[in-house]
Image (cartoon, rainbow, N blue to C red):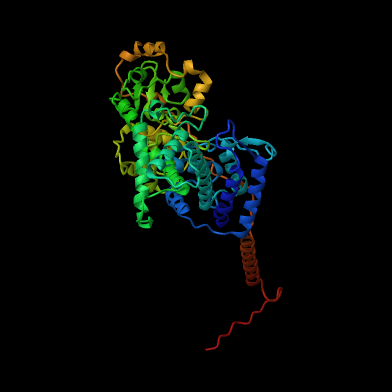
């Protein structure tokens, strides 16, 4: 809807107003939910009445990235997507474009009741949930159009970039620069480095010591510093035509914010090399390509930089542990482990930067071939063979795909259902995580895990590691059947219907069409009756019919 697209402009203004007055690093940042709700109500009511459009480079970028995904999603009778499908689209967009894990858009994220929370303060980290709940209240009945999903993505992205502004402002203060200062290149690098440290260490003043070498806490800091300098260099190159040729180049606050936004947008993709290094170390032990390594092999990794020390309980909670075989013992699923939140690098109030989900790329290529929410077995095979991996689809894989198709009345496979994701895991075991049933996985980042178990139990103890290294499982060779017992036919589909589909709905045009159809039907009935009835009932004539010749 154009009205949904139009909601973006003033909606952004409200988001900025509701968070601008808070200090950046309070122990618990809070905002009045009552003020958010009232302002959102007013803004959306005004926008829906005016129907202004929005033309913006960022919106165009979102549209381009979202379009192929939206075309492949299941839709309701209006061609819109339901709230659960919208959440899936938002998760996919930020994951594949920024490597962001957005808070408040989880598959079963709780709804923020704006009426219940009226007059109370909530944590700033709840703002994405409030944005989602508000938009779902407005557009949940008929579903989200393409523009509606664009508006949701743009709103969350704007929240994140507003946080960037406050982080840069605090970086200026920590480095004793006024906001109006003109910075030299080395001073700008200093501010942006502080910005990255704040983002990585979640902005704790007590924990942040700018005199401390960041590499002590983050082993890839030197490479990160190169990334920061490259970002500055790229910005200089792109804007050299508008730069003054006289004197030394200086940078203002807006320049720092622009570059910090770029760092936030691109850091996930850039830092993925760390995830690739971990993946390569684990794949070396996956001799049969099952996407699994023995837990003993997992604990035996001593790379110097990367040491795999998560306790088995943490791996289990994250859904990264395969314990389906009593003979083979516990095994770590490589793609599930890499995509677990324990491997997230940074955590802002609104998102975490984690390893890129390589299955997003697989899905993008499949969706480009299929271009719809369902597909036949042959269409799936053709699309899968056209991906960059070009997997060797075995007879077992083919049989599994046919089993999935037989579960559905139309013999087609739901591209975004659990069973298809499970099939992809066995076909692309190093890229696609195994999709657990609802409630099995309990995602926690490292800080949350530490808070739960304490410092003493954060990592696997020497006793636990030794137990797994010396177990019988450690001496049994890897098997080609590893993980086979995890295959099941438990389907789970996104809910695509909306209240619009379940309730009778009559528009003016549909009523007029119905009246016209009834009128035509009445006319036909009358005509048929007149043709079947004599002009003078009860009288007949034996006079022969005469023709003029």
User: Seen in the image, is 484 located left or right of residue 152?
Assistant: left
Residue 506 against residue 295 in the figure, above or below: below
Residue 95 against residue 533 in the figure, above or below: above
State whether residue 518 appears in this view: yes
Quarter of the picture containing the N terminus is bottom right
Residue found at the very far bottom of the displayed protein: 549
Residue 404's quadrant in the figure? top left
Q: Residue at x 47, y 35 (%)?
A: 199
Residue found at the very far right of the displayed protein: 538
Residue 302's quadrant in the figure? top left
Q: Residue at x 39, y 16 (%)?
A: 326
Residue found at the very far front of the displayed protein: 247
**Between residues 410 and 4, which one lies in front from this camera angle?**
4
State whether residue 398 appears in this view: no
Residue 463 against residue 6 in the figure, above or below: above
Residue 74, horizontal then vertical, whole percent: 49, 46
Residue 102, horizontal then vertical, whole percent: 50, 38
User: Seen in the image, is 396 located left or right of residue 503?
Assistant: left
Q: Residue at x 45, y 43 (%)?
A: 93
User: Seen in the image, is 260 located left or right of residue 529?
Assistant: left
Residue 419's quadrant in the figure? top left
């Amino acid at each position: 809807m154009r009205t949904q697209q139009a909601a973006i402009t003033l909606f952004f203004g409200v988001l900025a107003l509701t968070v601008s007055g808070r200090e950046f690093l309070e122990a618990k940042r809070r905002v009045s939910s009552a003020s958010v709700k009232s302002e959102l109500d007013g803004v959306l009511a005004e926008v829906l009445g005016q129907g202004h459009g929005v033309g913006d480079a960022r919106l165009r970028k979102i549209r381009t990235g979202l379009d192929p995904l939206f075309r492949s999603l299941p839709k309701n009778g209006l061609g819109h997507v339901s709230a659960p499908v919208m959440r899936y689209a938002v998760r996919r967009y930020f994951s594949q474009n920024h490597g962001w894990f957005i808070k408040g858009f989880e598959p079963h994220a709780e709804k923020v009741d704006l009426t219940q929370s009226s007059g109370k303060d909530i944590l700033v980290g709840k703002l994405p949930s409030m944005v989602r709940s508000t938009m779902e209240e407005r557009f949940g009945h008929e579903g989200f159009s393409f523009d509606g999903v664009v508006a949701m993505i743009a709103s969350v992205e704007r929240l994140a970039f507003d946080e960037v502004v406050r982080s840069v402002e605090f970086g200026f203060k920590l480095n004793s620069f006024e906001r109006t200062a003109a910075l030299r290149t080395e001073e700008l690098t200093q501010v942006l480095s502080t910005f990255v440290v704040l983002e990585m260490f979640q902005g704790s003043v007590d924990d942040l010591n700018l005199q401390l070498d960041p590499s002590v806490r983050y082993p890839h800091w030197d490479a990160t510093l190169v990334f920061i300098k490259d970002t500055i260099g790229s910005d200089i190159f792109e804007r050299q035509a508008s730069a003054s040729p006289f004197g030394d180049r200086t940078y203002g606050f807006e320049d720092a914010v622009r570059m910090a936004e770029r760092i936030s947008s691109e850091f996930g993709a850039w830092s993925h090399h760390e995830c690739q290094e971990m993946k390569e170390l684990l794949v070396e032990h996956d001799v049969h390509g099952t996407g699994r390594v023995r837990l003993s092999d997992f604990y035996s990794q001593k790379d110097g930089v990367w040491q795999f020390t998560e306790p088995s309980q943490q791996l289990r909670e994250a859904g990264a542990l395969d314990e389906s075989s009593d003979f083979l013992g516990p095994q770590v699923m490589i793609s599930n482990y890499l995509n677990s939140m324990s491997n997230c690098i940074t955590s802002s109030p609104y998102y975490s930067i984690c390893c890129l989900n390589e299955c997003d790329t697989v899905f993008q290529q499949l969706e480009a071939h299929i271009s719809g929410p369902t597909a036949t077995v042959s269409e799936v095979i053709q699309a899968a063979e056209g991906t960059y991996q070009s997997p060797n689809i075995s007879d077992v894989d083919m049989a599994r795909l046919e089993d999935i198709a037989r579960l559905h009345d139309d013999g087609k496979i739901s591209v975004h259902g659990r069973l298809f994701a499970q099939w992809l895991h066995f076909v692309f075991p190093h890229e696609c995580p195994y999709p657990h049933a609802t409630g099995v996985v309990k995602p926690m980042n490292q800080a949350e895990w530490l808070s739960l178990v304490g410092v003493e139990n954060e990592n696997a103890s020497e006793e636990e590691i030794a137990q797994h290294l010396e177990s019988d499982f450690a001496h049994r060779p890897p098997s080609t059947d590893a993980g086979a017992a995890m295959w099941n036919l438990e389907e789970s589909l996104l809910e695509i219907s909306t209240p619009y589909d379940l309730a009778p709905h009559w528009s003016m045009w549909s009523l007029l069409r119905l009246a016209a159809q009834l009128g035509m039907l009445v006319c036909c009935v009358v005509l048929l009756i007149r043709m079947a009835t004599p002009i003078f009932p009860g009288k007949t004539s034996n006079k022969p019919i005469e023709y003029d010749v």
